[in-house]
Amino acid sequence: MTSPSRRAPVLRILTAEEVSAGAAERWRDQYRHWDGDRRFHDGMTKREADDAINAAEQTPDGLKGVLNPSWTHPSCDVCGEPATVVAHSDDGFGNTRSCCLTCAEKIAALLRQFPRAAERVREPTPHF
Ligand SMILES: [Zn+2]
């Protein structure tokens, strides 16, 4: 069960078009707290990356050359195959979870088979 002190985020399914169309927006949201001079692993500053995104054609293929492909073509968080289900949280952090249909169906089947698995994992009861 959910702790009463913490609100569960609302998830929603995004269409493939929404995933692609929102890639630049989600990137900016994720790095909104970064200073423009902060550098990514490839040496590019956030400002340079932002300029490159602005200059790119705002299509999945155009953005694929600038953004990591996972922004426009997400992979399943469980198995790494192309995702068919993408859930976006409104938790204020723009968290997105991606899943392929196969893994989503396996998880749903597991929860139907073992309903108690849907309960939160608790600390084990100590044995004395
Ligand atoms: Zn999967």
Image (spheres, helix red, strand yellow):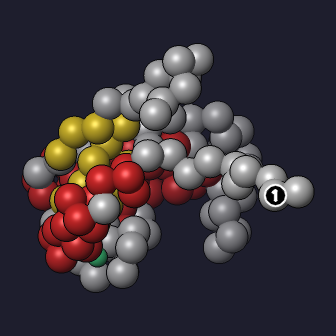
Q: Residue at x 13, y 57 (%)?
A: 16
Q: Which of 31/123 is in front?
A: 123
Q: Relative to 77, does residue 55 appear above or below in the rendering?
A: above
Taking the image as shown, residue 115 lies to the left or right of residue 60, namely: right
Ligand 1: image quarter:
bottom left
Residue 51: x percent and y percent?
47, 50
The three-letter code of the residue at mark 1 reads His
Taking the image as shown, residue 59 lies to the left or right of residue 127, namely: left
Residue 91: x percent and y percent?
45, 29
Q: Quadrant of residue 68?
A: bottom left
Q: Which of 24/44 is in front?
A: 24
* Label 1 Cα crowd, 10 Å radius (few <14 / some 14-19 / many 20+): few
- Which element carries disc 1, helix, strand or loop? loop
Q: Residue at x 65, y 73 (%)?
A: 42
Q: How many marks?
A: 1
Residue 106: x percent and y percent?
23, 72
Q: Which of 122/56 is in front?
A: 122
Q: Is mark 1 within 8 Å of ligand 1?
A: no
Is residue 55 shown to the viewer in this render? no
> Dot 1 corresponds to which residue?
127
Residue 2: x percent and y percent?
48, 30
Q: Residue at x 32, y 71 (%)?
A: 76
Q: Relative to 13, does residue 53 appear above or below in the rendering?
A: below
Q: Which of 25/111 is in front?
A: 111
